[in-house]
Amino acid sequence: MFIGEYTHSLDTKGRVALPAKFRQKITTGAIITRGLDRTLFVYNRSDWEALAQKLVALPLSQSKARAFARLMLAGASEIESDSQGRILIPEYLRKYAELKKIAVFAGLYNRIEIWDETNWKNYKSKTEASSDEIAEKLGEMGI
């Protein structure tokens, strides 16, 4: 599982060091794709395969299902870390996630989210400010 929050700098080529605690979980490579909230999602191969199977099973007749499948599948790219533990984030994904100099890696159990540092700080402060309301809604869902 992926847990924790880590900050790393992007180099001029779009490479960034994968947090050491995450490297061991994706030794056979991983998939990076567009996520939600202007983030990037990174999955190990087995979790990606499970998600991809669900996406291709969505009904083609529903426009929102097609749109979500396109967002996730067409935006996907295989990644591997180099000898220094860095991954290359393709330019189109860096642009989508508005990644500039600093990337934040957030471990969310079965995936990693990669955020631009400023976007992450803004999101986190907004979420923390409404944590009571969020907790109440989750309580209504049985969590």
Image: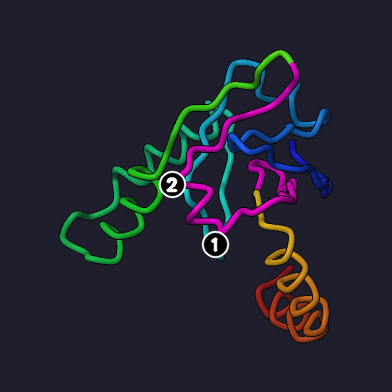
Callout 1, which amino acid? Arg
**Residue occupying the point 69% across, 26% down:** 86
How far apart in space, not on screen, are marks 2 and 1 (Cα)? 12 Å
Amino acid at pointer 2: Tyr
Is 43 left, or right, of 139 in this rendering?
Answer: left
How many numbered discs, if any? 2
Quarter of the image where the C terminus is located = bottom right
**Residue 121 appears in which quarter of the rendering?**
bottom right
Q: Residue at x 48, y 56 (%)?
A: 96
Which residue does the numbered mark 1 point to in the structure image? Answer: 38
137 sits to left or right of 99: right
Q: Position of residue 4 (x, y in %)?
A: 83, 46
User: Relative to 143, does residue 58 appear above or below in the rendering?
Assistant: above
Is 64 left or right of 44, judged from the image as shown? left
Residue 118 pos. (x, y %): 72, 65
Specify the segment rendered in magenta. Answer: 84-113
Residue 68, placed above or below residue 1: below
Residue 109, label in figure: none
Earlier sequence position, callout 2 versus callout 1: 1
Task: Name the side, left or right, on which 95 lies relative to 139.
Answer: left
- Circle 1: is it few (<14), some (14-19), or many (20+) Cα within 10 Å? many
The residue closer to the viewer here, 9 or 67, is: 9
The kind of secondary structure element at disc 1 is loop
Taking the spot 56% from the left edge, 49% from the top edge, the residue there is 40
Task: Give percent across and percent down for residue 122.
Answer: 73, 73
Q: Is residue 97 shown above or below 16?
A: below
In the image, which is nearer the foreground, mark 2 or mark 1?
2
Q: Which residue is mark 2?
A: 92
